[in-house]
Image (tube, rainbow, N blue to C red):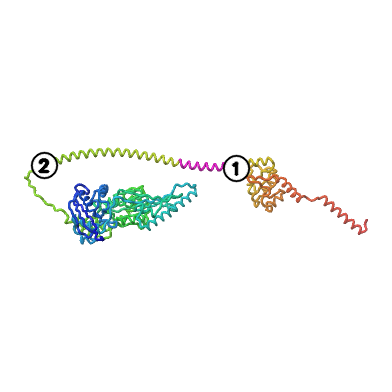
Amino acid sequence: MSSAGYEAKCMGVDLESGSPGGRDARYHIMVVESSGHVIYKAESVSLAKLIRLAWEYRPEKIGFDNIYELGEDERSLIRILSLLPPKTSVVQVTLVDGQFLDVREVARRAGVLSDYSKLDPSKTAYINAVLSCMGYGSNIKSVEEKTLIQVSKLRSHSPGGWSQRRYQRRIRAAIYNVANSIKEALDRASLDYDYYYRESKGGLESAVFTVYAPREAVEGIVSEYEGQDYTVKIKPVYRSKLLVTVKQHIKASKPIIVGIDAGTTTGIAIVDLDCRVLYISSSKNLDRGSIIDTILRYGKPVAIATDVSDPPETIRKLASQVGAALYTPPYDLSVAEKRELVERIIGESIRDSHERDALAAAIKAYSSIKTKLDQIDKKLEGLSEEINREDVKKWVISGLTIAEALERVIEGLLEHEGAKPRVVEEKIDKHKQVDVSAYIVELERLRAQKEILESKIKNLESAIREYERRLREIQYNIRIEVLRDNEVVKLQSRIKDLESYIESMRSTISRLEDTSRRLVDVIARVARGDVIIARRIPVLNITSLKKSERILGELRSKEVIVVENPGIFEDKALQYIKNTGITAILTNNLDSPLANTLKLYEIPVLNIKDYLVEDIQDIEVSIIKSSIIDDAKRELEKLKSLRKPPDIERIIEEYRAQRREELSKSMRVSGIK
């Protein structure tokens, strides 16, 4: 606490009477050394004097059991805190490790107080001073520094179709990897943060980190980046807002159940212990401080609920920070079950999925403890109305038995019994003359004030009607804009389709122009007699021939046919081309069954490799060297020579000569002349 003889000074403050921060507010003040020795004390001090004394003594810390004793709202608090010495820390001693405790409980833990006896303002001011010197509580800052880290993809310029889908998967995987790297870096640096992301097939669409530290602390850990696929941006977020915004004197004791659907858009739903909906909303980029501010306006959370069995780390931190139990269902709630839970309580469905999920989580948490709450109501039937049923339920939810919770509430009533003001009956002399003039003046003042307020109400009602009219007009304009935007989207889609079609047509035109140039060249070569045009068919059958004739006209004599596959042919097709009188067949295998059969039909068959100039794919023809004509004639003569019929007359004459010779020889042998 001290070194080299130095004694730290701390000031303790407690509100005595009046409105916090107002002219009528009066405070008790204690200035103590770290040893606990009182060096100054004062009672019924105004706010102005409190600030002057803070500058006079310049304490290292000023302790409060409730910071809102300085001002009724954040705006006035921030203004007052700005008037205190800059090196003086303001401490709420009842905020310990993120949980709000009774000042007597903190004092008992610190050894400053041995029991739960009632405290007067002077004693409370002293305890606040000593606890702040001992390091209890949390510092209150008027400006909160946060840093936002955003990981998002850049606009795609890749091609469509499957290539686009592969590109998107690659980007999502990259964002997933860089978000994991950032998370690991923040964990290593032990920085407090909230992490929200949008998941998609193959990875993440985007990720957002809200880091509860200034930008300078983050920049040494995470660096900004902008590449072709994704970007990492770091920007500070400053709020003129109190770090702790809990008004303990407003609804602080009302137990509530809070459902949270955490994400880029966060849904919040609050119900009481009768499952009445107190609040439901959703908003983007909410941090933990904003969520806590919202929750504590409606009461003290006894349970933080989620709709998934494995809740995000942000929800775990939130439950720990507000000192509430964390409820998770045994399994992830389905959409159908969440709709049924919500409709059962409010009688209608909710379009906003984040609000629906948050409310379903709160209702599910309530359902899990409803039996025990009903037991409490039954147990408390007939007991004194002074016993607060909600307090009993709060203690039971926190882990006590019904009997223990009941005793705890009764003990609280007994402790506060001595604080009740005594009612002193004053005897009034009926015969005493009462001066009513003061009352008449007050009545007239109230009547005038009433007229002023009624006039203000009329003006406000008129303003509301005007705002409602403007709202309807804005909504109408928004609908028009939405319709226009939808039409723009359709037109953009149509333009994209047409651009794709135009590109396809350009490709077709380019190909046809190339074919046209080639055909012009072919025609010129045909005219010169360098080449001839041959039909090209896949196989030699009637089907292929008829298809070729539909495209190029009927088969004519003297034509040349190119057969791509000589392994398949039909006899009918062979007879057909034989009758037509074609010049030759070109194929790539002269030893194939087709080639051998063609030779039997005396149809010349030659090797395509020796004559092919080029194939024209679009019209299924081939350009062939004109030398095929002469070569085919020679091949035909060769085939005919192999198949020439024998000389019958010569054979008969030779036979007769042979017979005559044999007969003559026989007659000579027998002596006949």
Q: How crowded is mark 1: few (under 14 residues within 10 Å), some or many (20 or more)?
A: few
Q: Label 1 sits on what residue type?
A: Asp
- Numbered mark located on residue 514 in the image: 1
Image quarter hosting the N terminus = bottom left
Nearer to us in this view, 630 or 580: 630
CB of mark 2 within 8 Å of CB of mark 1?
no
Nearer to us in this view, 579 or 302: 302
Image location (x, y in percent) of residue 668: 92, 58
Query: Which residue is label 2 attached to?
Result: 436
Image location (x, y in percent) of residue 262: 35, 52
- Numbered mark located on residue 213 in the image: none
Q: Earlier in the sequence, mark 2 or mark 1?
A: 2
Residue 84 belongs to the span the image colors magenta: no
Image quarter hosting the C terminus = bottom right
Residue 84 visible in this rendered orientation of the protein: yes
Residue stretch rendered in magenta on the structure: 491-518
Residue 508 belongs to the span the image colors magenta: yes
Q: Label 2 sits on what residue type?
A: Val
Say which of marks 2 and 1 sits in front.
1
Image location (x, y in percent) of residue 431: 6, 45
Q: In this view, does 528 lie above or below 246?
A: above
